[in-house]
Amino acid sequence: MFKRLPCIFVLSKENVQSRVEFFTVKQNFELSDIAKNPVILALSLEKRVIPRCNVLEVLYSNGLIGRVNAGSVTTALKLNEEKFIEKYVTKYQVTVPEMVHAYKCQIGLADLKEGDGFYKM
């Protein structure tokens, strides 16, 4: 993993632990999923990972995308901002109008759908 992503050495132990915990506990990733895509450990939980995971959960709960798994989450996280918004937010904003606001954290995700599947920042 370190060979594929040497910049991980600049992250604090706490940052790495919190990210690994989020992916393994909240997203049901295996450690091997993280080892295959170590770049996800370098991404900001608050600014990128949690908002995007919430968008995927909203889409899944509305039956608009298939099962959310390590592969789909990793793919969504690797997209640049413009492509992510185009593929997941803009595409479904008519069906789920609150999606844009939820992604920008202007409303709480509990306003979209009650449940335990969403993550607070």
Image (cartoon, helix red, strand yellow):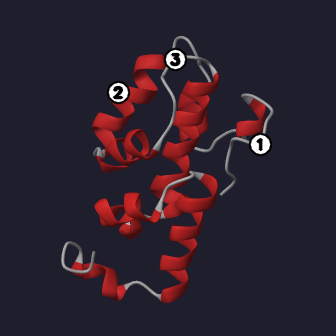
User: Total number of numbered labels?
Assistant: 3
Residue type, numbered disc 3:
Leu
Q: Secondary structure at mark 3?
A: loop
Residue type, numbered disc 1:
Asp
- For image coordinates 30% across by 38% down, the residue present is 82
Residue 108 location, quadrant: top right
User: Which residue is label 2 attached to?
Assistant: 87
Residue type, numbered disc 2:
Lys
120 horizontally vs 7: left or right: right
Q: How far apart are the two marked residues, 1 and 2, measured between alpha carbons? A: 25 Å
For the residue carrying disc 2, how many other residues have a C-alpha within 10 Å: few (<14), some (14-19), or many (20+)?
Answer: few
As drawn, the label of residue 67 is: none
- For image coordinates 79% across by 36% down, the residue present is 115
Res 33 seen here: yes
- Residue 18 image position (x, y, % from top left): 57, 73
Q: Earlier in the sequence, mark 3 or mark 2?
A: 3
Q: How far apart are the two marked residues, 3 and 1, measured between alpha carbons? A: 19 Å
14 horizontally vs 82: left or right: right
User: Which residue is label 1 attached to?
Assistant: 116
Discs 1/2, front: 1
Q: Quadrant of the N terminus?
A: bottom left
As drawn, the label of residue 64 is: 3
Q: Earlier in the sequence, mark 1 or mark 2?
A: 2
